[in-house]
Image (cartoon, grey):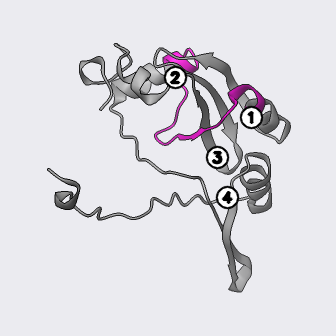
Amino acid sequence: MTADDAPVPAVRQLRLVVEAEDYDAAVAFFRDALGLPEQAAYSGEGDARVVILDAGQATLEIANPAQKRMIDEVEVGRQVAPRIRVAFEVDDTRTATRRLVDAGAAEIAPPTVTPWQSLNSRLDAPAGLQITLFEELRDLDERATLDGFGTEGGRTA
């Protein structure tokens, strides 16, 4: 298949919409502390407010229950994740974790090197979200050669 034969993606953007009881605290945390740039903000009647933050490239990671349990065990050492957990790739997991804890997140697990060679921490964040911060310690080609980190046949796609 050539690039000209490639199917046109049906989806252009993934947007995760989160209801936050303490809207101002959530915006301060994700925009100001985590550093997600503001793309737009809207308000309406009845104090309706929304801010759209740019989180870079989006992916949808679908895991079966066994994979979810395995990730919890690696990152935290016990089962803690709700059905939905949001993961953010950062340049420096240790620094970002400290900054977000200082901004009000609760650390569930400190930065930990995973079998798939990333440095991950787990936090309880505003708006009821559990988040993972991850820093890739190897490039994609190096990670593709690693066996046994929860992928079919031990390799990434």
Instruction: Specify start and end residues of the magenta stretch as a single range.
Output: 73-96
Mark 3 or 2, nearer chain start: 3
Q: Identify the element where label 2 is drawn.
A: loop
**Image quadrant of residue 121?**
top right
Mark 2 and mark 1 lie on one chain; the one further toward the N terminus is 1
For residue 96, the mark is 1
The amino acid beneath tag 4 is Ala
Q: Is residue 119 visible?
A: yes
Residue shown at 51%/51% (left/top)?
57
Give the CA separation, mark 3 to mark 2.
Answer: 31 Å
Mark 1, Cα crowd under 10 Å, few <14 / some 14-19 / many 20+, is some
Which residue is nearer to you in this view: 18 or 42? Answer: 42
Indicate yes or no whether the magenta region holds residue 10.
no
Q: Which residue is denoted by mark 2 in the rendering? A: 138
- Mark 3 or mark 2, whichever is nearer to me: 2
Q: Residues within 10 Å of mark 3 (few under 14, many from 20)?
A: few
